[in-house]
Image (cartoon, helix red, strand yellow):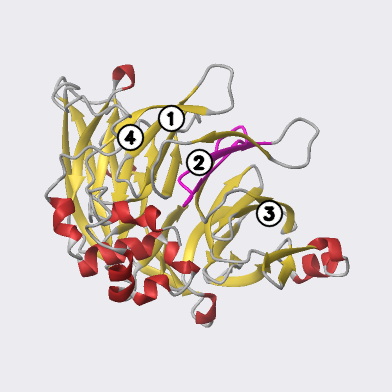
Amino acid sequence: MRVRSCLPAWTSTADDSVISLPEIQKSFPKLFASDNSRSPEMLGSLSTSGEISCGSSLQSSLSLQTLPSVPSLQKLSSEALNLSVSHLCVATLKPRPVHIGCLAVSADSLYAASGNQIHVFDLKNYAHLDTFNTDDSSSGSVKSLAFCDGKIFTSHQNGKIRVWQMTISKRHQLVATLPTVNDRLRHFMLPKNYVSVRRHKKRLWIDHADAVSGLSVSDGFICSVSWDKCFKIWRASDLRCLESVKAHQDAVNAVAISGNGIIYTGSADCRIKVWAKAPGEKRHTVVATLEKHKSAVNALALTGDGSILFSGACDRSILVWEREDSANHMVVTGALRGHSKAILCLISVSDLLLSGSADRTVRIWQHGSDGRYCCLSVLEGHEKPVKALVAVSDGELKVAGAIRVFSGSLDGEIKVWQVSVSSHNGPLTRIF
């Protein structure tokens, strides 16, 4: 395990004498038991349930600037933007007393992964509609959810991706597990289709060898990233694995794909890599490596036009990357600071950015003029780290600038927030 990747989530000092490695090992032996300790969920759990001795140190030194070489961008206030912001927690959903791993919205339904189970709620009245993946706890916790070609894709701790379809009775039925049996039969005979995953251990290249931490969909294809340091490309129509790429030197925690097919991967090796496929080529190649974070990258988000990339890490900063002219990659323009612990999730909604953190809060950031930002609001109420976020336009309210934000936490709760942004000069044109 890369200890330097997780220490920033625990302490705000660079002095290694604050907590020695043997002390950490003695206090948290399970953290060092396996490679799964690289998960940001584990970091968040330790940050809250234990509040270990350096937690108070972190809380008392919020003025310490992370990544001091990167300028801060939150130089605007809501007053400067002539905006007033209100938020209200209108509901709390608790599917079961197990952490919420991820959230996703499809049509009029909210999908919430709680441990190994996926729960479905009606977006209108929050009624519970269905629960699936209940029969097999061996798959481990659900890491990510995605929708493509009328199918629901779920990624799991055991390295598998499951494919579901909704039946006429509105229930979810398992139709395949990736890689499929047909895909295995197509590859298992040839020795060249096997790759070494550790000493004296080989697998088919279509297999993930560790937890599948993220899924992203683009134009009928699914990109999966894993703690096995690789990403794979799957075709949704026939569920075949088309490509596998060794992407990083450590676990891959996050993935985002722009509208033109450029893939961004964030890793525990502190790097973000940019991948593209040259015309006529079948494989993605790295076109840029973005290096500014000093600890594990946990979350990525792109604006709708793909011109701005946001990255969140255990160093408590959100970095803002903007595209250079005539380039396929980004350059860092600054940082958004305010969270006191690791950034665990990010989503971009029009000119808003929402961030969830191990400090148990959600922050809402507004993109202003000249590339500057404003923290519009801080949503508080969770008792443990915020692991998942999703937002939808609140058309039912018929109020311009209104959205509903769903935040899922390791405390097992999903909070529903009604957030409204209005202008002091009159009605605000809908921006969401």
Q: Is residue 352 left or right of residue 80?
A: right
Q: Is residue 162 shown above or below 372?
A: below
User: What distance separates the C-alpha of mark 4 from that of mark 2?
Assistant: 22 Å
> From the viewer's perspective, is the residue at label 3 or at label 2 nearer?
2
Q: Nearer the viewer, residue 275 or 71?
A: 71
Q: Is residue 378 left or right of residue 192?
A: left
Pointers 4 and 1 in contact (C-beta within 8 Å): no
Other residues around mark 3 within 10 Å, as few (<14) / some (14–19) / many (≥20)? many
- Labelled disc at residue 272: 2
Nearer the N terminus, badge 3 or badge 1? 3
x then y, percent, for residue 134? 49, 79
Residue at the farthest front position: 17
Label 2 element class? strand
Which region of the structure is painted magenta? 257-276
Closer to the camera, 416 or 304? 304
Q: Are marks 3 and 1 in contact (CB under 8 Å)?
A: no
Residue bearing the label numbered 3: 236
Q: Earlier in the sequence, mark 3 or mark 2?
A: 3
Going from N to C along the chain, the mark reached first, 4 or 2, is 2
Query: Which residue lies under the disc numbered 1?
Result: 321
